[in-house]
Image (tube, helix red, strand yellow):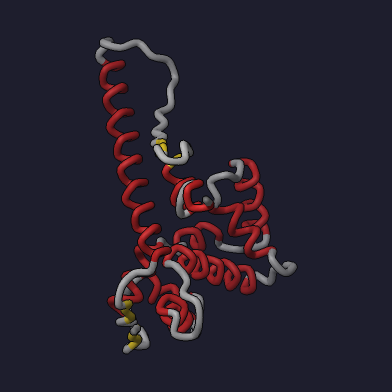
Amino acid sequence: MSEHDDTGEGCDCKVGRIVDRYDLRDLNDDLAADWTGVEGERRSLRELAREVDRRVLRTAMDRAGMEYRDGEVENVYRILTDDDVSSGSRTETRRELEHASVPIEQVERDFVSHQTVHTHLTDCLEASMAEPDDAERIENARDTLRALQNRTVAVTDDTIGRLDGADALSVGEYSVLVDVTVVCEDCGGHYTVGELLDAEGCDCTDE
C-alpha cells in the first residue's frame, strides 16, 4: 500500500520553492501519484526528476513568450542535460534561450536530482512505499556503483597528479576511465555494469 497524507504546501525544500516560483500547482499531486502508482504504473524517481525539470523549462519558455512545437521542450531539455550531446550544441541552445529572454542560468539551477525529489516526496508530501520495486532497486544499485566508480576516478586522478607533480612519474595530458565488466560464466556474455542493469539480465534470461 502507498500513502499520501500531505499536500506539501508551504514546504521550503527545493521542489517546494520551485512549485511556488513556477506556479506548478498540480506538481505535488502528480509526483505523489506517479511515484506510488495509485493511479496506474509507477514512475521512478529519476523519471520524476526529469518531469520536474521539463515543467520548469516549459514554464520559463512560456513566460518568455517562446513558440515551440510538440516535443520541442523535451528536445531542448535533452540537449541541456544529456551527456552524449556535444558542448557546441548545448552552447548554441543556451544562447537561443538567452536571446529569447529565458533565464536559462536560473532554470538550470532549478533542475533537480532524484534524491531531491525523494526528499520532497517522503519528508514534505509524506508519500511512502511499502517496498521498492525492481526498477527502484536497480536505480539504487546504479547510483551506488556510479558513486564507487566516480570515487575510483577521483582517487586515481589525484594520485597520478601528485606523482607527476613530484617528478616521480612522467605523463602527458591524460584522462582516467573506470569501466567494470561483468562476465557471465554460464552464457559467456560480457557486459559493462550499466549494460547489465539496463538489460535487467544477461543472455541467460533469453534462453
Q: In the rendered picture of this protein, how many numbered marks are placed on residues? A: 0
User: In the picture provided, is 151 more to the left or to the right than 207?
Assistant: left
- Image location (x, y in percent) of residue 46: 45, 63
Asked whether 154 or 199 is in front, the reply is: 199
User: In the picture provided, is 51 more to the left or to the right than 95?
Assistant: left
- Image location (x, y in percent) of residue 81: 54, 53
- Image location (x, y in percent) of residue 132: 34, 69
Q: Residue at 39% x, 36% y: name it.
A: 180
Asked whether 189 or 75 is in front, the reply is: 189
Quarter of the picture containing the N terminus is bottom left
Q: Residue at 51% x, 46% y: name it.
A: 203
Observer able to see residue 154: yes
- Image location (x, y in percent) of residue 178: 39, 33
Q: Is residue 58 above or below residue 90?
A: below
Q: Residue at 53% x, 46% y: name it.
A: 83
Asked whether 200 or 28 is in front, the reply is: 200
Observer able to see residue 67: no
**The quadrant where residue 32 appears:** bottom left
Q: Is residue 152 above or below residue 30?
A: above
Q: Residue at 30% x, 77% y: name it.
A: 130
